[in-house]
Image (tube, rainbow, N blue to C red):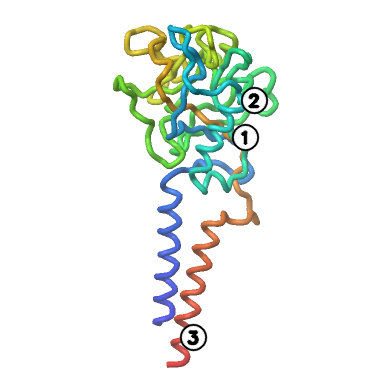
């Protein structure tokens, strides 16, 4: 009877520890069937410059290539071992100028070019953002991208707004425009708002009603999007953290049984 009680306690510890761990972020959205494909997107807890010049033509320390923004997204994801364990690539949801690159191109979510790989996209709270690539770039999203890699919210900005660097138009374009990132002309740099579901999630406006042209030197987060993921199927190996919890539980139960037998 005692052994059964201890086993129940151990299993309960494993269950609640695993649930607590999964409660910070959701990497397998609820409602998916085994084998279903999907993607994840989050707002980074870390911040960077826009890679553009301010009105005086001065260029703050920032990125000059799209790959640097992608690396920034990857570094943010790697702050959480749960995201690292997914083994996916992470790309920045940004449009840039010089080099010209659309957000939909950089994230491989162009509704035309990437139609055959279109999958639903979820934020790390487990909520649907878009049912597919066309839905992502139709001007609105289902739920805001307001969860960072650690399960927290977006970083507050100096003007009391929640903003992210995007450089993008609502249709995922914007490459080469004066409002795109890595713009050295001192023009406007586009921002989004991670707390809304309107088009301003990707094309927000600044505190003065303009396109945030006074914010070139600000540090802001970005959106990071995963590659295509697959919901676990029967026989898939549990994630490392879950295996570690199960191993600790088994060791604890084994030790108890040995002590009970020698008593």
Report the front residue among 10 and 208: 208
In the picture, residue 64 is in which quadrant? Answer: top right
Q: Residue furthest left?
A: 160
Question: Residue 126, how many percent across, how many down?
Answer: 46, 38
Q: Are marks 3 and 2 in contact (CB under 8 Å)?
A: no
Which residue is located at x 45 percent, y 81 percent? Answer: 256
Q: Are marks 1 and 3 in contact (CB under 8 Å)?
A: no
Which residue is labeled 3 in the image?
258
Question: Residue 176, how many percent across, how many down?
Answer: 59, 9
Q: Which mark is residue 88?
A: none
Which residue is located at x 39 percent, y 81 percent? Answer: 2
Q: Which mark is residue 108?
A: 2
In the picture, residue 235 is in which quadrant? Answer: bottom right
**Vertical placement of residue 195 versus 250, above or below:** above
Query: SS for tag 3?
Result: helix
Of the image marks 1 and 3, the number of the one nearer the N terminus: 1
Which quarter of the image is occupied by the C terminus? bottom left
Q: Are marks 1 and 2 in contact (CB under 8 Å)?
A: yes
How packed mark 3 is, by other alpha carbons closer than 10 Å (few <14, some 14-19, many 20 or more), is few
C-alpha gap between disc 1 and disc 3: 47 Å
Residue 108 relative to residue 251: left or right: right
Of the image marks 1 and 2, the number of the one nearer the N terminus: 2
Question: Residue 174, how many percent across, how many down?
Answer: 56, 11
Report the front residue among 258 and 213: 213
C-alpha gap between disc 1 and disc 2: 9 Å
How packed mark 1 is, by other alpha carbons closer than 10 Å (few <14, some 14-19, many 20 or more), is some
Query: SS for tag 1?
Result: loop
Of the image marks 3 and 2, the number of the one nearer the N terminus: 2
**Vertical placement of residue 18 versus 160, above or below:** below
Q: Which mark is residue 227?
A: 1
Residue 197 relative to residue 81: left or right: left
Query: SS for tag 2?
Result: loop
């Amino acid at each position: 009877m005692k052994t059964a009680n201890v086993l129940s306690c151990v299993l309960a510890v494993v269950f609640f520890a695993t649930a607590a761990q999964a409660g910070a972020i959701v990497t397998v959205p609820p409602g998916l069937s085994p084998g279903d494909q999907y993607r994840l997107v989050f707002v980074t807890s870390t911040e960077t410059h826009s890679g553009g010049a301010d009105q005086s033509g001065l260029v703050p320390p920032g990125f000059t290539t799209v790959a640097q923004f992608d690396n920034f997204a990857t570094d943010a994801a790697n702050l959480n071992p749960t995201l690292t364990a997914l083994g996916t690539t992470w790309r920045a949801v940004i449009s840039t100028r010089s080099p010209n690159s659309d957000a939909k191109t950089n994230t491989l979510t162009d509704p035309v070019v990437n139609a055959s790989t279109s999958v639903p996209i979820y934020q790390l709270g487990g909520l649907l953002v878009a049912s597919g690539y066309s839905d992502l770039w139709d001007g609105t999203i289902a739920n805001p991208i307001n969860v960072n890699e650690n399960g927290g919210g977006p970083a507050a900005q100096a003007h009391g707004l929640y903003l992210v660097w995007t450089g993008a138009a609502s249709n995922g374009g914007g490459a080469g425009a004066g409002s795109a990132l890595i713009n050295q002309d001192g023009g406007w740099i586009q921002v989004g708002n991670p707390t809304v579901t309107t088009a301003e999630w990707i094309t927000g406006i600044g505190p003065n009603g303009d396109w945030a042209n006074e914010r070139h030197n600000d540090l802001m987060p970005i959106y990071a999007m995963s590659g295509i993921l697959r919901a676990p199927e029967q026989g898939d190996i549990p994630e490392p953290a879950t295996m570690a919890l199960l191993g600790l539980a088994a060791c604890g139960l084994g030790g108890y049984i040995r002590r009970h037998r020698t008593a």
